[in-house]
Amino acid sequence: MRFLLIFLFCCSNLISEISLEDLDFIRSISKSNTESIINNGTKFCNDYFDKRKFSKDSSKYENFFMCKFSKKRNRFYIYMLGVDHKENLSVKNHCTEILNSRPEISDHMEPKLTFQKKNYLSGFYIDNFFNDKVLNFFNDRDIDKLILNNEINEFIIKNRYNFSDDNVSNNDLVSKEIQKLNRIYKKIIDNYESDLDKVIKNQLEQVVRYKIFINDTKKFISYSCNWQPGNGMIPYVKREKFKEFENI
């Protein structure tokens, strides 16, 4: 896997042609039962927004973004549904107002801010995964040590039925996970990008799109506002029902 990615970087003209599906296929060949980049990225993205669907008032439910990967179009959509059109605003201005209320997303439209890490896309970077989640550390020895110990304890509890009477085999299983966890920790603390990270980042820059669906209930018309990262805050507006989008 490593040598293949190095080869692809040497042939830089091929990088833009490799899709996330291709990467999943390559990983499945190099390692059986490997995690799908697309599935993990989509799930993590949806979990991220699902946890933020309530306002400061925990009893108040807010409209939130969802995530969907379209294999047909090779696009990863981050979208919001069911927004009622404000009569005093144009559809374009209404969408921009919504986007401005979510700085973690609106920053992705600004050309000068596209370099920033987008936490909701972290699930695509499989090299940062441990125990089915993306890890975050604080570069504080005491705090990070607690996080590392907790992760190993969680791993042991989660995999308790995989252990046997053979303590040597059990210790080997735990040791491999500790080594994996330490590699992730070093990578995150050193802010290191692996070859795989670079390919994924390149792909995400090409395939991520944002959409907000606006419903004009008086005219019985539905619109969608569409953005591409780095292209500014002004959306492209078109007539589109969610049902049409759902089938792509």
Image (cartoon, rainbow, N blue to C red):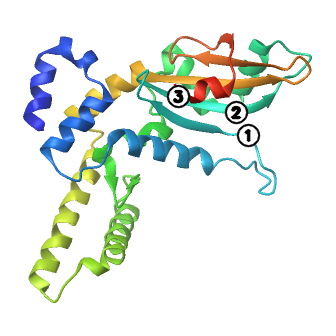
Which mark's residue is nearer the viewer, 1 or 2? 2
Q: Would you say the residues marked 1 and 2 are in contact, meaning their CB atoms lie under 8 Å apart?
A: yes
Q: Residues within 10 Å of mark 1 (few under 14, many from 20)?
A: some
Q: In which quadrant is the N terminus drawn?
A: top left
Mark 2 is surrounded, within 10 Å at the Cα level, by few (under 14), some (14 to 19) or many (20 or more) other residues, namely: some
| Label annotation for residue 77 | 3
Identify which residue, 18 or 182, lies in the foreground: 18
Between disc 3 and disc 1, whose residue precedes?
1
Between the C-alphas of marks 3 and 1, the distance is 16 Å
Residue at which label 1 appears: 63
Q: Residue at x 15, y 48 (%)?
A: 31
For marks 1 and 2, give the CA distance.
8 Å
Quarter-of-image position of residue 131: bottom left
Position in image of residue 61 (x %, y %): 78, 49
Judge left or right: residue 130 versus residue 90. Answer: left
- Name the residue beneath numbered marker 2: 81
